[in-house]
Image (spheres, rainbow, N blue to C red):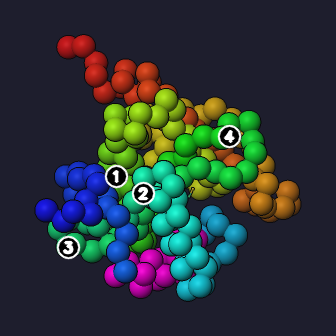
Amino acid sequence: MNSNVIISTERLILRNWEKSDIAPFVQMNSDPKVMKYFPGLMSSDQTLQFMERIKLHFEEYNYGLFAVDEKSTGEFIGFIGFSHPRFESFFTPCVEIGWRLRSEHWGKGLATEGAKACLDYGFNVLNFDSIYSFTAIPNVPSINVMKKTGMKHIGEFNHPSLSEGSWLCKHTVYKISLSEWEADHYKCE
Ligand SMILES: CC(C)(COP(=O)(O)OP(=O)(O)OC[C@H]1O[C@@H](n2cnc3c(N)ncnc32)[C@H](O)[C@@H]1OP(=O)(O)O)[C@@H](O)C(=O)NCCC(=O)NCCS
């Protein structure tokens, strides 16, 4: 098995990043559908800088945003994983789970499948107490992933890097604790 593999699900592999991910990652971050709920598209340089930040995060924490392959094709389809928001808010510092998939791979349940496996890894391997996720309020597809993984709404905040007049400024925050995860996954028969 590829030694880069960190998490394996029915249809996905979550793994460390490889040089060959650069081209499809640049393509994903320049797709207007994918970047609809972000302030803008990412240029190639911005994506390379983002990859560098992901690499530094892995070096510091030994986990991060994992590259995702679809098993049936071996194709890179995006990322799912953990990061640490760098801004101050009522729920930070915290561990955040996030996801971004190439638009051709939406609508197959892959984000939710990968996110559930990641939460399991976060609680059972990385020993997190709680995991948070947040997104701009209009980003219903992402909020749906939060709900389907069992995360609960805990509040809203204005994202500090967006102007208050922006339609993306107001964000919603979801959270799941270890005890909630265990209650959902280890029910007594
Ligand atoms: C957020 C994002 C990852 C969600 O992707 P997604 O494919 O919609 O999410 P899911 O994996 O939960 O798939 C759900 C859909 O798959 C469908 N589906 C098909 N087969 C399925 C299966 N076997 N199991 C589960 N769902 C399945 C569901 O019915 C649902 O479709 P619907 O939305 O039309 O009802 C995607 O929209 C994305 O990458 N967006 C851009 C980046 C972004 O905004 N990230 C979040 C920023 S904070």
Q: Which residue is mark 3?
A: 73
Numbered tag placed on residue 95 in the rendering? none
Give the alpha-carbon distance from disc 4 to disc 2, as whole Å: 20 Å
Part of the protein shown in magenta: 20-35
Residue 22 highlighted magenta (yes or no): yes
Badge 1 residue CB within 8 Å of ligand 1? yes
Badge 2 residue CB within 8 Å of ligand 1? yes
* Dot 2 alpha-carbon crowd within 10 angstroms: few under 14, some 14 to 19, many 20 or more: many
Amino acid at the residue labelled 3: Thr
Q: Which residue is mark 2?
A: 80
Task: Say which quarter of the image contains residue 183.
Answer: top left
Rendered-image quadrant of the N terminus: bottom left
Q: Earlier in the sequence, mark 1 or mark 4?
A: 4
* Dot 4 alpha-carbon crowd within 10 angstroms: few under 14, some 14 to 19, many 20 or more: few
Q: Is residue 5 above or below residue 18?
A: above
Q: Which residue is mark 4?
A: 92
Q: Which residue is mark 1?
A: 114
